[in-house]
Image (cartoon, rainbow, N blue to C red):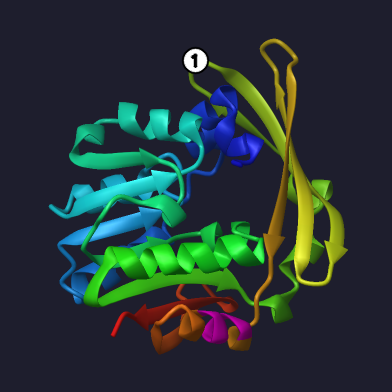
Amino acid sequence: MADECFGHPRLAAVYDLLDPDRSDLEAYLRLAEEFGARRVLDIGCGTGVFALLLAGHGIEVVGVDPAAASIEVARAKPGGDRVRWICGDAAALPSLRVDLVTMTANVAQAIAGARAWQETLRGAREALRPGGRLVFETRDPAARAWQGWTRERSRRVTRVPGVGAVESWVELTGVCGPLVTFRWTYVFGADGQVLTSDSTVRFRGREEVEEDLAAAGFTVEEVRGAPDRPEKELVFLARRP
């Protein structure tokens, strides 16, 4: 099930404008170029920002996401016809043989259930050619990022062309071991509509992720700090033998 911020048509339509800074994707593009990837599967592609960035560099891309509203936004963007869009998840993909599988931003953490995570890793492995790589990031639990998820720190008002002012903020709603829940609230100034989106993410430590990757048949090649958040996030580079 997709969270409302991705699955609700009104929220999906403004998602990119509420979170416009995607400079984090440049590191993933450089990795794709470093690996010489010609075919890429982007799991959790959302509104297609990274998939379209790759396609613009001549890379064949498959984008998969469970949120139909986000897929529709992605498909309607300029260049959207260059990407093969799939509404679903990595556990039930058609036969693919890609060079690289990516999960950018917080996609890996949003797959919070143990079974869903295992199925996603297996699906990624099956989609890869032998020697292909999986790359994704996850917040380092030691940084305790959730402590900053408050209305006071996150509240902002964004002027969206054709929509008007949209006020948004996030609030932590619970912490239970590695599972952290939070709620985004959106207020549309034009008509006063209030929409909320509840999410749960899993904070996995490095050792846990490495064990999960090994169990799914991957070889961990390297673990890096995220270039834009070096002490807050970990980037995993794994290879299918």
Residue 33, position in %: x, y? 20, 69
Q: Main secondary structure of the magenta part?
A: helix
At 72% from the left and 81% from the top, the residue drawn is: 142
Residue found 61% across the figure and 64% down from its top: 115
Left or right position of 157 against 6: right
Q: Quadrant of residue 43?
A: bottom left
**Does residue 79 appear in this view?**
yes
* 195 inside magenta stretch: no
The stretch in magenta equals 208-212
> Which residue was labeled with disc 1?
162
Residue 196 screen position, x and y as percent: 74, 33
* SS for callout 1: loop
Residue at image location 66% in from the left, 61% down from the top: 113
Residue 22 seen anywhere in this rendered image of the structure = no
- In the displayed structure image, the side of residue 222 where residue 117 appears, left or right: right
Which quarter of the rendered picture does the C terminus lie within?
bottom left
Q: Quadrant of residue 35?
A: bottom left
Disc 1 residue crowd, few under 14, some 14–19, many 20+, Cα 10 Å:
few
Image: 207 above or below 26: below
Tell me if residue 99 comes above or below residue 77 in the rendering: below
- The quadrant in which residue 47 appears is top left
| Horizontal and vertical percent position of residue 92 | 41, 51
Q: Position of residue 156 (x, y in %)?
A: 69, 39
Instruction: Please name the amino acid that badge 1 sits on.
Output: Gly
**Closer to us: 119 or 12:** 119
The total number of labels drawn is: 1
Q: Please determine whether, in this image, residue 145 is positioned above or below residue 185.
A: below
